[in-house]
Amino acid sequence: MVTTHEVFNQPAPLVDTNLFSANRAMQAALAFNAPALDTAPLHALGAVVGSGEMQTHARLANVHTPQLKTHNRFGQRIDQVEFHPSYHALMTEAVAAGLHGTAFSAEQQATGHAHQLRAAGFMLFTELEPSMLCPISMSYAVAPALKDNPAIYKDWEAGLTSRAYDPQLKVWLDKTGLTMGMGMTEKQGGSDVRANTTRAEPAGTDAWGQRFSVTGHKWFFSAPMCDAFLILAQTASGLSCLFLPRVLPDGSMNQLFIQRLKDKLGNKANASSEVEFVGASAWLVGEEGRGIPQILAMGTMTRLDCALGTSGLMRQALSLALNHTAQRKAFGKTLIDQPLMKNVLADLALESEAATALALRLARSFDRTDDAHEQVMNRLLTPVAKFWICKRGSHFAQEAMECLGGNGYVEEGGEGVMARIYREMPLNSIWEGAGNIMAIDLLRALRKADAAAALAHELAPARGMHPALDRLAAQLPIRVEEMATEMEARRLAQDVALAVQAALLAQTAPAAVFGAFCDSRIGGEWGHSFGSLGAGVDFDAILTRALPH
C-alpha cells in the first residue's frame, strides 16, 4: 500500500495517569470534610483505575455485553447471566477497594471517615467504568438495612463486607464474598411503589425469622446475578421489605426467573432485567407493612451514589476534553489557547469542581449520624445533590464531547470513552427517582426539620465573601419557610444546590474558582450555555487547577 499521508496533530490518549493525584478539587474537598483521612488508599486506587490495562477492561465489558441464558443444553431452566471476563476483572478491583459494604465493617467505621473514603473511591472508579458499579452501589445501600433482620445480618455480614469478589452462584456459606441488589419497581407503578402487586404469603418461620412465599414480578431488577435482594411485596399488613436470596440455605435455586435483559441507551456492562417470582422464598426485614420506610433508607444511600457517580463522570469528561485540547492544534495554536475554547473548558471546570464539593459534603453527613446538624443536612442535601448534579450531567457531557469534535462522537479507541460517558449521563438523573421525585423529597425534608436554620448555618462561613451569594443566602431561609407548593420545588432545589456549592468553594477552592462560580451561577454574568463566562475571569488559573496531569 502506498503511503499517501502522515498522521499528525492527533493527541496522545489519557492513559496510565493517577486519577487521584491529579484531582485537586477532590483533594481539597477531602481535606475540608475529613482532614484526618488517610488518602494513601485513594492514591493506590487512582493508579489502578487510570491504568491502560483497566481502561481496556472497561471497553471490553461494554463491547461484550451481558448475555442471558435461561436454559441449559438439556432444556433445564438455569436463569443465569454470562459476563465477559473484563466485567469480572472490574468487579474484582471495585470489591478489593471496598466500594460495596466494606464501609460498614467495624474496622472502617472506627476510622470515622469510612463513607468519605468510600465516596471518593467510588468517584474515581466511576471515571473508569460506571455501569458495573450498580451491584456495588446496591450492596453498599442494603448492608445497613439488613440489620433489621439480625439473624440474616449475622450470617451475611462477613460476606457483604469482604474484599473478595466471588461471582459463583452458590449458597452463601460457601462463598468468600457476597453482593446484594434491590427490587422495587413494577411495570404498572414505576416510582409509585405503593401500586405494587407482588404478593407475599406466610410460609412459616425458621432461623431467619418469618418466611414468605412470593409471587409477582419486578420491571427493573438490576444485577440479577447478585446473591440476594431486598424486595417490596404486599403482605397482609401492607407493603413489606423482604430478603430474597438467589440460592436457598439448602443449596437449591430460589424460584426467581429472569424474563429478559433490558436494551438500554447506556449502562451496557450492567445487566438490568425483568424477573418473575413464582412461589419464591423470602424473609421479612424490619416491621411488616413498613416496607416503604425501610426501602427509602436504602434509597438515600443509592442517591448519594448517583451524585458521586455523575461527579466522577464530569471529572473524566473534563479530563478528556483538557487532554485533547492541550495537544490538538487549530488555526495556529493549541485549542486550549483559543479564547472561546478556554472559556468553555474553564466553565466546565467550575461545574466539575462544584459537583465534587457538593457530593463529598453530602458524604460527610453519612459519617456523622450522631450530629444533629449533619442529620438535617443529610435529609436536605440528598435530594438537592441528586437533583442538581445529575441534572447538569447530560449537558456537561455534550459540551465536553464537542471539545473533541468528531473524535468525541466515535465509539473507538481511547476517545471513545467520551461517547460512553455521554450515553451514561442521563441514567443517574432517572435512577432512584427522577427530578420531580427529588424536588418533592426536598419539600418533605423541609417540613420535617428546622431546615432553614440548618441551611443558614451551612452558608454562614461564606457570608460577606460575594454580594450575589449574600443575597441568595439571605433569601433562601425565607423561601424555605414559605414553601408551600410543588410548583416552585425544582427552582428551590437548584438555588439551594448553587448556594451550598458556592459556600463550599469559598472554603476549599482558590479565589479565581469561587469568584467565577458566584459571578456566573448566582450573579447573572452567564449565558444559557457553557462557555459564556465574563471576560474578567482568571481562565488560566482555573484551567491549571483542573488539568489531569
Image (tube, grey):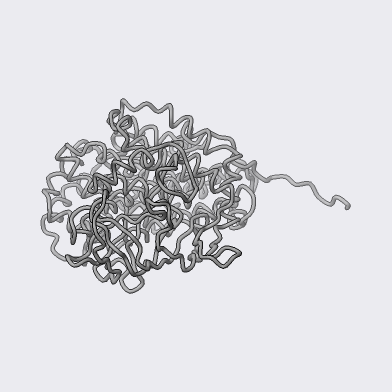
Q: Is residue 329 above or below residue 71?
A: above
Q: Is residue 434 above or below residue 24?
A: below
The image position of residue 151, as x and y in percent, is 26, 45
Residue 320: quarter of image: top right
The number of numbered discs placed on residues in the rendered structure image is 0
Looking at the image, which residue sits at the far bottom?
A: 188
Please state which of residues 85 and 382 is positioned toward the viewer in this rendering.
85
State the residue at coordinates (34%, 43%): 156
The image position of residue 416, as x and y in percent, is 59, 52
| Residue 75 as seen in the image, left or right of residue 290 | right
Q: Is residue 536 visible?
A: no
The image position of residue 209, as x and y in percent, is 23, 52
Q: Is residue 389 above or below residue 327?
A: below
Please state which of residues 449 and 29 is positioned toward the viewer in this rendering.
449
State the residue at coordinates (11%, 48%): 450
The image position of residue 108, as x and y in percent, is 33, 32
Q: Is residue 483 visible?
A: yes
| Residue 344 as seen in the image, left or right of residue 158 | right
State the residue at coordinates (61%, 47%): 414
Please state which of residues 518 and 115 is positioned toward the viewer in this rendering.
115
